[in-house]
Amino acid sequence: MPSIHRKGLVLEIPISQNPNSTLKEGTFVGPSLFNWLVECHGFLHNAILILTSLAFVIYLAFQAKKSFRKLSNGRSSIMIAYYCSLWLVSLLNFAWSCFQAWECTPGKELLWNILSLFTTSGMLFLEVSLIAFLLQGNYASGLEDLTQPFGVSALIVGLDIFLKAVYLFGFGIPLFIDSNDHSHRMKWSLWVIHRLVLTAVYGLIMFMYHSKWRERLPARPAFYNYIATMFILNALALFACALTGHGAGFGYWLYGITIVCYHAFYLPLLYVTFLADFFQEEGLNLENVYYSEMKDAGFFDDDWD
């Protein structure tokens, strides 16, 4: 347990260690590197996370010049803030993917918890922002309407960071130290609540798409596909957390799969769903694109009756 000495006082920070840890504290070379690749989470786990997160960062870098030109011409402060947030979270996610060894290295638990806290909170901020935007109304109402969802998301994620920090550093609950040790019932109960809320929200939006309130939502198939994908992912994660909390090994395996899928593919999915059209060439008339998609989705069928 790490401690801080100051003028004769000792302040202990309760950091739980990974009971499955196989790495030795020390330099990250030689045998330690081999253990990280093979024994910590496995080569395939780490390779998927690193390669996908790196590929997305490289893609953003190649598109940066055109994206900044579009942002400067559009002069949308909210879109600039959202794009910068995407860049920051993408870099955090890449760092999180590269430093998986910290989770299994004694003495690195504090650094791992801090990195995981800010990475997951950043991704949650983007996720909640898009949810709030979808619930606000139609996409055609204007990009500056992102101001209110942006503020609401910041408040929600700020509260989420505070609560997780209390659980991590106040009560010593190993939220980000993954192991099949089901003795931490409180940890898995907290993740069940977290996933249950997200699953319920995505389920509500899917219901709205099939109800009389669908006119309140953006009439774009891409948004519906995004909601359906996130609903399935969170439902699987909810099921996995519940199983793991009761000691089922299959639940822990399924939970690991959902975590890899989320960190590997969520940011590209978000970009394709929400930002890709905004960064199209200048001559592209997005209103015609949205009208075509709305027509294909059947939103104008009543006009022909």
Image (cartoon, grey):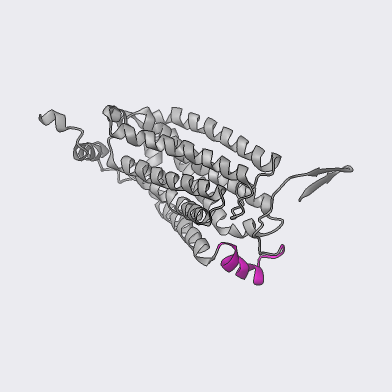
Location of residue 159 in the rendering, given as x and y in whole percent from the top left corner:
58, 32
Q: Is residue 117 visible?
A: yes
Identity of the residue drawn at 69% across and 53% down = 17
Q: Is residue 118 above or below residue 101?
A: above
Find residue 36 and report its image quarter.
bottom right
User: Which span is picked out in magenta?
Assistant: 25-41
Q: Is residue 130 above or below residue 58?
A: above
Location of residue 234 in the rendering, given as x and y in whole percent from the top left corner:
44, 44
Which residue appears farthest toward the bottom when viewing the image? 30
> Within the magenta stretch, is there residue 264?
no
Location of residue 109 in the rendering, given as x and y in whole percent from the top left corner:
67, 52
Q: Quadrant of the C terminus?
A: top left
55 displayed left or right of 154? left
Instruction: Tell which of 224 and 142 is nearer to you.
Output: 224
Identity of the residue drawn at 61% across and 45% down = 185
Q: Is residue 124 above or below residue 57?
A: above
Total tally of numbered discs in the picture: 0
Identity of the residue drawn at 57% across and 68% down = 38
Instruction: Tell which of 177 and 149 is nearer to you.
Output: 177
67 displayed left or right of 23? left
Which residue appears farthest toward the right when viewing the image? 8
